[in-house]
Image (cartoon, rainbow, N blue to C red):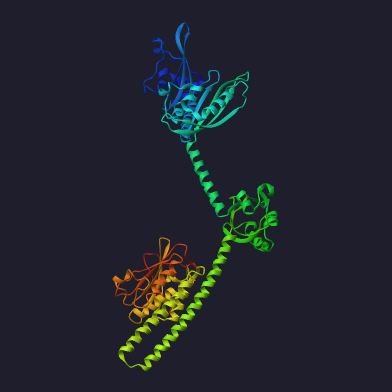
Amino acid sequence: MTYANPLHREIFGYTRPEEYTGLSLCDFLTAPDRGKKPWNPPQAQEHGSLPKEVEFLGWRRDGTQFPIQVTAAQVTISDAPAVLTFITDITERKKTDEELRGAMGQLSMAMDMAGLASWEFDPNTGTFLFNDRFYKIYGTDAEREGGYRIPAMEYVERFVPPDEMPRLTEVMGAVSHPDYDEDFLQVEHSIVRRDGERRYIIVRATSVKDENGKRSMGFGVTQDITEIKRAEDRLRSTMGQLSMAMDMATLASWELDLDTSTFTFNDQFYRIYATDAKREGGYQMSSMEYFRRFVYPEDYDIVRNNARNTTLPTPSIGYFQFEHRIIRRDGEVRLILVRSANWQSEDGKHRKSFGINQDITEMRRAEEELRRSREKLNLLSDLTHHDIKNQILIQSATLELMKCSITDPEQLKRIGRLERSVNIVQEQIDFSSVYQRMGTALPQWQSIEEIARCVQEQRPAKALVLGKGITGLQVLADPMLIRVFHNLVEDSLLYGGGPMTVTIDCLEKGGDLILTYEDDGVGIPYEEKGELFTKGFGKGTGLGLFLCREILAITGITIKETGEPGRGVRFEMLVPEGKFRYVNGQGAHPEVGQGEPSKVC
């Protein structure tokens, strides 16, 4: 090497010309595919294989490598042949190329994930240029199709179903016309893949024009939207079913922009109000205008007070409901149930309320008719019970007088059997009176702690023990829940074998609550457990435990007996999730142990 300019020294890390003494060009170059075997331009010159541009790895003075491009030319210097070499550091270009390859790889992956394929169209020849990704969507390949170029009409014949051909042929004809000047085209149509499956695609295309304004080339992408179309079809079907269900239930949705106090209604909403969008001037209406047009005057305060939940500067995020009357456009007064929930954007700039209105006029009328019918039946039942009890009282008194005047043992036995029969009738009448009241009142949240104390006062056991989990516990049940515990205590005292301790506790299991009742009496034999809650089974009337099961079942609570004979009874009442709560922040102890109960009586 006879000469190197200053830039060469800078690129390769040299500072002075004398540092090049004894070095040749091949000391600076290594072909990437040759390991450390150098490339010798003079030898290449001798063999006539001197390329114009070659990429190499360059060796800096410190031993590091970097990509370079070498351009060599044969020249004559002082009448002697020589090689003039130009070296360019292409590190940044290589880095850019690598980033570009990575971006292209990501783009290719994204196109595959989105079911996208690109293509070109030559308007001069009417020919498409496809690629492997395009053919993949169509379930074929270039070998089967005879290459990547296909005439436009042949594409239609191969892949477009007959029912789509007229429309697509018309579109392609319009695009091919010289007067077509749209810059962008989008069209959806179905295709038939080579495997016979019908799928749906969306085509988006644009074109490039030459200096004369004539389209010289078209470019586009095709996307397989079959799954999107199927999802849209399912959504339309679901929305149709939902709309039908809402119509059947006289339900209508609405939206309220809290910033502008503007309602947005729909046709279902207007049908409930016996009107339509044309009559009301569109689907949007101010809240004050809605108030003026449709709210029953005597219910102004009801609506106004409940509306405050949605018009506060910071609306409460939650669900609420209320009822009020409306005046329809035909003048009929109807009753609606309004359910609403508020929404606020994260930045607090947008606030909305969403809700549904349900016409409950007929439901309330039916409930009122049912209430009146129940009152009549209860009145009839009470009168009947009263009359029967009077007759039972007369029979009991007569039997008692007969016992005073009869001394024959056989006749006294017969009178005793009659008395037991009369007593059974009395108990059945009492049971029917209780049973008819079951379920007539709405379930209520009831304190188990208060119920236990009340039962203890009425029918005291030796001791009443309440577990820690009972503190603050409330159960949603029929108002006759206290009767359940009264019957359990009654049975413990009558059949448990003398004075005993009653323990009431609970534990949570899988989101539900197990409420337990235990005593330390004689327990229940295994052979009797299967029929324990059957009507008529037992030592007494056989109605107590049956009644307990029926009262609990009103709100989905189940009961079973799991005690061991000889060690006392254990009744487990399974309270479903959502049917119990704690009003003082307490909670049931976990399933792993019952903890130390505290005596409170």
Quarter of the rendering containing residue 456: bottom left
Q: Foreground residue, 79 or 107? A: 107
* Image quadrant in which the C terminus is located: bottom left
* Image quadrant in which the N terminus is located: top left
- Residue occupying image coordinates x 43% and y 33%: 197
Return the residue found at the far top. 79
Residue 599 visible in rendering: no
- Residue occupying image coordinates x 36% and y 73%: 536
Query: How far from the left and from the top, in percent, is residue 196?
Result: 42, 31
Question: Relative to residue 201, is residue 492 depicted above or below?
Answer: below
Query: How far from the left and from the top, in percent, is residue 314?
Result: 62, 56
Q: Foreground residue, 565 or 48? A: 565
Quarter of the rendering containing residue 500: bottom left
Query: How far from the left and from the top, in percent, is residue 486?
Result: 43, 76
Residue 460 visible in rendering: yes
Question: Relative to residue 211, is residue 325 depicted above or below?
Answer: below
Q: Foreground residue, 428 or 243? A: 428
Counting every numbered tag in the picture gives 0
Quarter of the rendering containing residue 324: bottom right
